[in-house]
Amino acid sequence: MAELTTALNILSTFALIAALAFTGLQVRTANRVRAEQAALSIVHAIQTDEWARNLNILTRIPPGVTAAQIDTLGPEIKEAVEQYGMRLETIGYMVFRGFVSLETMEQLLGGITVIVWLRIKPWVEQDRVLTSSPRQYEWFQWLAERFEDRQTRERLPAFVRHAHWKQSDARPAT
């Protein structure tokens, strides 16, 4: 009888360990799916004609211009900053909260986000003062600065860094 009790205890211990392992794998899979869905939602949100138009307008701002010079470029610049900035605010906050990884967003939007931020930064800083709203575009700035930090460490663009990539190298988002 003692042997049967011991065997059942061992069996129940193994069953509990297996259940915990299975639960851990399910949680991991669910987290990966959630991260992939968040990234896909962002891609869907940014792949619009409006996004492309605003990005085109903002990337035409010459590097190194002042806020006053940006103001002379016309009212469409302010509208483009507002539209583009609103979306980057959301993306920055989603990264900060861990809904989507910094690495994934950096690979999708890193370079262009840094370029746009550096071009509009003087205008945003002036607008923060004029409107007494220091939190304007705060998550956009935060995100651009994180991307810029990463780019300082990883200077090679994807087409160079992953020139010898093969399908077998693909790894799921975490």
Image (cartoon, rainbow, N blue to C red):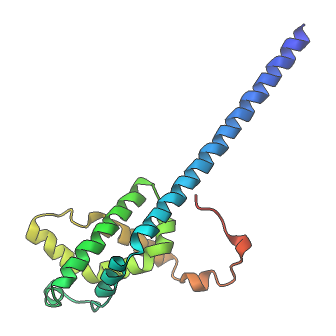
26 shown above or below 147 = above
Q: Residue at x 58, y 85 (%)?
A: 159
Q: On the rendered image, what quadrant is the N terminus found in? A: top right
Q: Looking at the image, how many numbered discs can be counted on the residues?
A: 0
Give 146 or 23, whichever is nearer the viewer.
23
Which residue occupies the extreme top position in the image?
1
Q: Position of residue 118 (x, y in %)?
A: 31, 81
Query: On the picture, is 114 further left or further right than 172?
Result: left
Query: On the picture, is 123 further left or further right than 84?
Result: left
Q: Residue at x 14, y 86 (%)?
A: 71
Query: On the picture, is 131 further left or further right than 100?
Result: left
Q: Quadrant of residue 91?
A: bottom left
Give 82 or 144, whichever is nearer the viewer.
82
Give 122 or 76, whichever is nearer the viewer.
76
Q: Is residue 74 at least partly visible in the picture? A: yes
Q: Quadrant of residue 70?
A: bottom left
Query: On the picture, is 59 further left or further right than 71?
Result: right
Q: On the rendered image, what quadrant is the C terminus found in? A: bottom right
112 shown above or below 143 = below
28 shown above or below 51 = above
Q: Position of residue 73 (x, y in %)?
A: 18, 90
Q: Quadrant of residue 120?
A: bottom left
Q: Position of residue 19 (x, y in %)?
A: 70, 33
Q: Residue at x 76, y 28 (%)?
A: 15
Which residue occupies the extreme front position in the image?
49
Q: Residue at x 32, y 78 (%)?
A: 50
Q: Position of residue 26 (x, y in %)?
A: 64, 44
Q: Is residue 121 at least partly visible in the picture? A: no
